[in-house]
Image: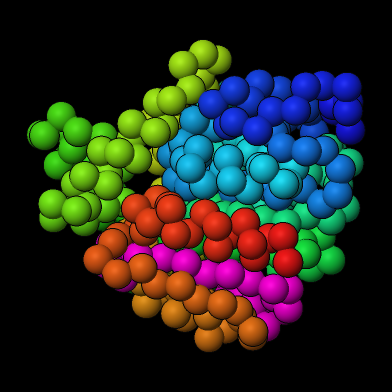
């Protein structure tokens, strides 16, 4: 393991130090918090995201009782290397990172693209994962998954014109409730004031988008192989990864639980963090 139990216990994501570990020639940047020991919860982040893109209102409640680890994918933020051309290869990178840390059993919390990577990881290494949370995501080959590219570029343009953060458009509805939730979410991401991560490069962002497009256009995976307890959540109006794909995942993964939040978009779990965070923490603790 890369850390010792003599370190002070960190339970606030805004205070979690950034560390690095090298695996397969790539140096991965990661943060960890919560009590060490037991099975860790590895967080798989969304398109264009770095370590700074996790909502502390989701991370911190889980870290009260669990060892939480977030990481930059290869070629993103403070991690070295390049973004791989496929989601499958991104899953192989994640496996290299996790095994370099010395873990052979993990729980996963994933959002959006992170959920796609998580699915490929579980399919490739079914005994690695004990519990799985898939939010704002969909299955390989899912209907209209490849449209994420068009939606993303359109919302980035809208955000530039209104001088807003693109996530306010991509993650939230543009009604009064959604606008308020979006601004609150973006403000929470700024709570960390020191040791912030490097933003993703344009080249890396485009490579991730292309990988998602390939994932959307490829043959479906056999998700009947996912037999571990799985919690699926989304908003009812996800424009990036259509909400119907969360229902599709639910039908493909036997015994999975599904939560669809009303009047919310791709970032439904962030809009409803007060409701969702305890549900996620309880699911992982069971």
Q: Dividing the image into 4 quarters, which one contains the N terminus?
A: top right
Q: Is residue 162 magenta?
A: no
Residue 60 is left or right of residue 5, and the answer is left
Magenta stretch bounds? 219-239
Examine the rendering and report whether any part of residue 283 can be seen.
yes
Quadrant position of residue 199: top left
Q: What percent of the width, then of the height, locates residue 226?
A: 70, 75
Rendered view: 252 above or below 16: below
Q: Quadrant of residue 188?
A: top left
Vertical side of 233 occupied by 200: above or below: above
- Give the image quarter of residue 76: top right
Query: Residue at the location (64% across, 85% down)?
Result: 254
- Residue 261, x across and y down, in percent: 36, 68
> Visible in this render: residue 140?
no
Quadrant (top left/top right/bottom left/bottom right) for the C terminus: bottom right
Does 202 sit left or right of 80 as displayed? Answer: left
């Amino acid at each position: 393991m890369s850390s010792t139990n003599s370190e002070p216990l960190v339970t606030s994501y805004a205070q979690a130090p950034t560390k690095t570990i090298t695996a397969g020639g790539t140096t991965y940047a990661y943060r960890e918090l919560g009590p060490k020991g037991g099975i860790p919860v590895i967080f798989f982040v969304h398109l264009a995201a770095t370590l700074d893109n996790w909502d502390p209102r989701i991370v911190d409640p889980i870290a009260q009782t669990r060892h939480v680890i977030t990481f930059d994918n290869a070629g993103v933020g403070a991690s070295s290397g390049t973004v791989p051309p496929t989601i499958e290869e991104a899953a192989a990178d994640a496996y290299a990172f996790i095994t370099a840390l010395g873990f052979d059993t993990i729980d996963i919390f994933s959002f959006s693209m992170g959920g796609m990577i998580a699915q490929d990881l579980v399919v490739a290494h079914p005994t690695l994962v004990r519990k799985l949370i898939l939010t704002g995501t969909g299955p390989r080959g899912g209907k209209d998954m490849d449209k994420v590219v068009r939606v993303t570029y359109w919302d980035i343009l809208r955000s530039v014109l209104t001088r807003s953060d693109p996530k306010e458009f991509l993650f939230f509805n543009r009604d009064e409730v959604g606008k308020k939730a979006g601004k609150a979410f973006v403000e929470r991401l700024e709570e960390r004031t020191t040791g912030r991560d490097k933003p993703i490069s344009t080249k890396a962002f485009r490579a991730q988008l292309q990988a998602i497009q390939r994932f959307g256009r490829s043959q479906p995976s056999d998700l009947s192989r996912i037999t571990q307890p799985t919690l699926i959540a989304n908003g009812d109006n996800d424009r990036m990864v259509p909400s119907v794909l969360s229902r599709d995942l639910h039908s493909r993964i036997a015994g999975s639980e599904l939560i669809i939040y009303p009047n919310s978009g791709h970032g439904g779990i962030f809009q409803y963090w007060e409701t969702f965070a305890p549900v996620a923490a309880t699911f992982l603790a069971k």
